[in-house]
Image (cartoon, grey):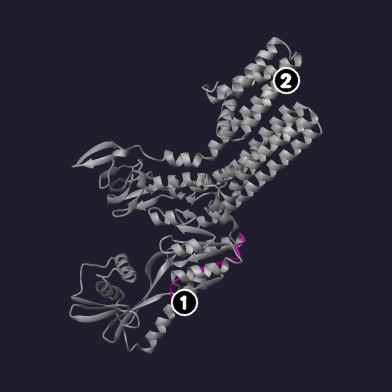
Amino acid sequence: MIWLKKHHRIIVLSILFVSSIVLNEIDPKMISSMIVMTTLTILAGAHIFKKALMDIRYRIIGIDLLVSIAVIAAFIIGDLFEAAAVTYLFTLGHILEKGSLEKTRGALKALMDLKPNMARVINQGIETMVSLDDVKIGDKILVKAGEKIPVDGIILEGFVSIDEQMMTGESMPVDKKVADKVFGATIVQSGYLKMQAEKVGDDTTLSKIIHMVEEAQDNKAITQKFMERFSSFYTPLVVTIAILIFIVTKDIRFAITMLVISCPGALVIATPVSFVAGIGNAAKKGILFKGGESIERLAKGDIVFFDKTGTLTIGKPSVQRIKSYGLDETMLVKIASVGESYSEHPLSLAIIDYAKELHIDLSDKPDKTDLVIGKGIIFSYQGKDYQIGNRKLTKNLTTDVVKDIKDFESSGLTTLILSEGDLVLGIFGIADEMRKDAKAVIQSLKDMGIKETIMLTGDQPLIAKHISDQLGMDMHFASLLPEDKANIIQKYKDSHHTIFVGDGINDALALSYANASVAIGGLGKDLAMETADVVLLQDLNRLIDAIDISRKVRLNMIENIGFALIVVIILMLGVIFNVVNMSLGMLVHELSVLIVLINAIRLLKYKGRFHEKRTRTE
């Protein structure tokens, strides 16, 4: 019977069950009735009995053993229909449960199905289709429109539009050019690219995501562990009570019926199915939970701390304002970019990038340069001496320049001064650009009932205040070292459930101190994917969905546990007052398991607040 396909098996068993009902009404003692009922019991119960024997071997008292005892007892007392009905209903429930559980794990299967099988490798100008397992680091690969990128790598040639939805949850395609990183399993929608493989096999981002989701679905939450411990004590207790009932009443039917309906099937499955469904839904949205315990901790959070750089901001400084004193602005940027041309400092790169935006020729280099640590750069260009840096580098500033600098700084801008000797030529206001969704995220957190949003940063107070005020945060702390951030979080933990959101790279200490930690990891940030409880693969706005999903999973779990307990209590009372028999009890029991599964599956249909908000605005 086990070898039959699932739907064929249900059909055969159902025909035998209907026949058993009819024959039981006619005469349960007829030879034909006994043959049909016995056949149904054997076919439907084979896997139950096999599992029960395995449980005995490993000293486990599980639901299969309880059902097996009940079926054997029913045969002993001559109630073949009861035995047939119990095995059929239990097997039907098991098949439906398995299908429902497979549905909750569908997100993991979808991720695994993303993996391409082949890659077009270029070797000495010749294109060859090879198995994905044969791709090596450094291989040159060609990917055409409509094809999946086979591995992680960097673009050597081409300009493409890539669909990264299944990995990040972002529905809009992303444009990529030479030197940009690309990730395996994403799809080239238009254009073509030649790339160099940088990560292959289990090192690709997709493989690591799949591994994280697998671990998360196996990582048990505190509530789930408690329920499993509870059932390990509960099941033997039920067996003991059934034996005592038989000793006292001498009524084996009553004792066995109590044994069957007390099975904690729905109770045992109540928590894991909720967590699996929630983890699966989140994974499709680019949210990776490390397990059920991470979900529980995030759901309880009532105060959220944010790192600034790379979290509330994009982590890349850019020129926001320029003030020129008598010099053409283009020439001002030209001279500044020449002076910064050899520097790798983020502020220097911001000026270089701004010059590129203005299409300024960057081929000119300074005649000589002198780096002044903590102040700036002194350089010569076309026979003139210049300097660019902070206030410590330039002296004798006029009142008007000082006023302009203070105006820049009050707006949260870091100021660089370009001067020729004591003559100030212009000032540059540079800032790390805020994430476009940061303000909306802060407001959404407040709408969700988060008590406080607090920014922790090592940046200077004026910049911290400006960003905090713009985002509408409740509080901010500036000029902090990593240990300072951790100490502040520790103080709040006495009275709050804390959540810390950082980039997962330089915030390891703060992430470890919070009750729940969230990393804005992004594709390719391996450390970010390993540090926190939750990793957001794409934008900050996914934080709202992550918290919302965690709360819905927790509520779903509570609903399932409550429902399962109520059903067991009602069935026990029904047996005591002689209104529930063994087969009816098993039917209600299996229906309760199915209802718990269906309730959990609802989590798979949750679209998320971010999705709903975007849908309304489009």
**Mark 1 crowd level (few <14, some 14–19, many ≥20, 10 Å Cα):** some
Q: Residue furthest front?
A: 247
Count of numbered tags: 2
| Residue wearing tag 2 | 79
Relative to 250, residue 555 above or below: below
Give the crowd class for mark 2: few <14, some 14-19, many >=20 residues within 10 Å: some
Q: Is residue 2 magenta?
A: no
Residue hosting label 1: 461
For this rendering, which residue is in front, 563 or 459?
563
Asked if the residues shown at circle 2 and circle 1 are in contact, with their CB atoms under 8 angstroms apart, the answer is no
Q: Nearer the viewer, residue 348 or 310?
A: 310
| Residue 126 placement, left or right of 482 | left
x%, y% of residue 127?
23, 38
- In the image, residue 5 above or below residue 135: above
Nearest the eye: 88 or 332: 88
Specify the quadrant that holds the N terminus: top right
Residue 460 falls inside the magenta stretch = yes
278 or 578: which is nearer to us?
578
Tell me where the magenta segment starts and ends, as one range. 448-461
Q: Amino acid at mark 1?
A: Pro
Residue 555 image offset from top left, x and y in percent? 64, 50
Residue at (70% x, 32% y) in the render: 259
Q: Secondary structure at mark 1?
A: helix
Q: Position of residue 556 (x, y in %)?
A: 63, 47
Q: Residue furthest right?
A: 577
